[in-house]
Amino acid sequence: MSLEESQRGVGVTEDGDLDYDELEDLLGEKVLAREEHLNAEGFVIRPDDVQDVLSTLKERAGFDHLSLLTAQEYLDRYESIYHMKKYDDPTQEVSVVVPTDKENPVSESAEPVFRTADWHEREAYDLVGIEYEDHPDLRRILLPETWQGHPLSLDYDQDKPQIVPLREHANPLQPDHKDAESDTMFLNVGPHHPATHGVLHLETVLDGEQVVDVDPDIGYLHRCEEQMCQNGTYRHQIMPYPDRWDYVSAGLLNEWSYARTAESLADIDVPEYAQVLRTLGAELCRIASHLLALGTFALDVYGDFNVIWQYAFRDREVVLNILEDLTGQRMMFNYFRLGGVVWDIPEPREEWFEKIRDFLDELPGKLAEYHDLVTGNEIYQIRCVDTGVLEPEVAKEYGVTGPAARASGIDYDLRRDDPYGYYDELDWDVVTDDGCDNFARVMVRFKEVEESAKIISQCVDLLEDWPEDERTIQANVPRTLKPEPDTEVYEAVEAAKGELGIYIRSDGTDKPARFKIRSPCFSNLQSLPEMAEGELLADLIAALGSIDIVLGEVDR
């Protein structure tokens, strides 16, 4: 291998494109076949070669981001798809397809190679029924341990009653008792909503006030969103659901994740004017989401910051008023449509633009006020500086994205690195911070609000000057979409909390055969033990708040 080839990486051409033939040569006889997915080629391998193949792609070809695991069942087999990317260039993607026997669906675990595979494989086992050898803790993650059957398997009977032995109804929260042989304390944090950002249960082991171990217990809010989308039509019935994943102001960002995937699947081009409208609405949602993250985090780290909660909600209400004018809704927007948006800017246009400009003009003063009250506060600094540390290599192992990754110095933002919408036509910067701690994660969100304001201002300028006869809000999309059978695609957007992606496989009908959601909160939350172990209990609460999760998206 030449020095030039070594520098650009194995499987990368001089033009910076992926050379899948070279990647196949790298993997050798382990590649049984190749599949053509719309976003990337897939290599089919044996179920006992998973660790070797993923290690090779990670260490020699630079695929250091295991973005998603999709599990599904066919009539003749089960299948796991590991969607791999590079943090340095997420447009370079490869899929590793692992078919398993119908009668004995067992595959080697990827967890020894990527820590993020831990929860992803547990979910695949829970909902689909694939077992993963060498997994350190293969048990259900979304459904109760006593659940019978796997809801996404083809033979699952959803009308069958769930019969649970009486002993399984015993209260898992046993009365306080002391074990004479142990010096540690087991403490349940949650699953009540306050201070856990949703119905989250943290099973915590303490040595005094120091966290020895913490195991997030999720699934209390599981709503079968993937199954509901698989029962809906592409064109009309799926779009209302994404608003309900991250339901705290991020609806348009969620809608865009589905729109981008379905438009790629059906080869739909979105008009330029509609792309500007999408970009404007998405950045308003990002600001609203970050304001809520700030207000709730202030409550987490210092109760006297109730005033910050109220200030954050005051400013978030202004954004929601603007979004309500645009979409007709305050939370469940349902504004995007495949091929564009549902309608144009409200009339009179200038009044709506004026509302946005007034908000943007007042924003710098409000942010300065927040910095005085929050980041400049000594108690806040003591609670946040050098606590909840997440080193960049650890963050990558867990597939952490969004502000949580950028606060660990990971320069990764899909708006810039895998451009969509109108982002590549605008002037803005990706915000990073190498602090790696709770303080850095909040500071990144503060600065991202400023960058979102820059994007919104430019969008308003464009929309004001857009010729009236060129304001096309939707492409000409067929009433019924029926993509070719076995067409597969994974696409993602940069949501407020990180990479929000969707995998879809079509079967030739107007409904998806498989619809899989890649939640940034799901992967980000998995990294909590890395931030909390060895810290004080109070630091655990701060670390959880700094990730900015919402359980509606974690559980889906």
Image (cartoon, rainbow, N blue to C red):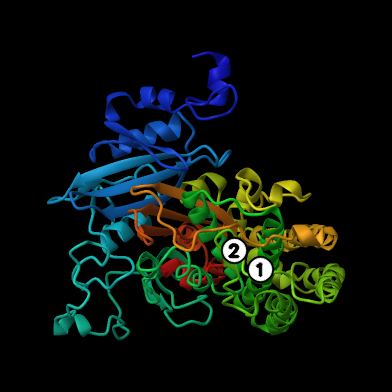
Q: Give the SS element for disc 1.
A: helix
Point out residue 444 in the picture as x, y percentages from the top left corner: 69, 58
Q: Residues within 10 Å of mark 2 (few under 14, many from 20)?
A: many
Answer with the quarter of the image where residue 274 lies: bottom right
Residue located at (80% from left, 74% from top): 352
Report whether 442 appears left or right of 111: right
Q: In the rendered structure, are the residues bearing label 2 and label 1 in contact, judged by CB atoms less than 8 Å apart?
A: yes
First along the sequence among labels 2 and 1: 2
Q: Mark 2 — residue?
A: 253
Report whether 536 appears left or right of 69: right
Point out residue 99 in the picture as x, y percentages from the top left corner: 24, 44
Q: Amino acid at mark 2?
A: Leu
Q: Is residue 302 above or below residue 6?
A: below
Q: Nearer the viewer, residue 183 or 444?
A: 444
Q: Is residue 293 above or below residue 23?
A: below
Answer with the quarter of the image where residue 541 lies: bottom right
Does the image show residue 111?
Answer: no
Give the residue furthest to the top.
2
Q: Give the SS element for disc 2.
A: helix
Q: Nearer the viewer, residue 242 or 451?
A: 242
The Cα atoms of the two marked residues, 2 and 1, are separated by 7 Å
Q: Is residue 82 above or below residue 544?
A: above
Point out which mark residue 285 bears: 1
Quadrant occupied by the C terminus: bottom left
Point out residue 397 in the picture as x, y percentages from the top left corner: 46, 47
Q: Nearer the viewer, residue 389 or 275?
A: 275
Answer with the quarter of the image where residue 376 lies: bottom right
Q: Amino acid at mark 1?
A: Cys
Does the image show residue 548?
Answer: yes
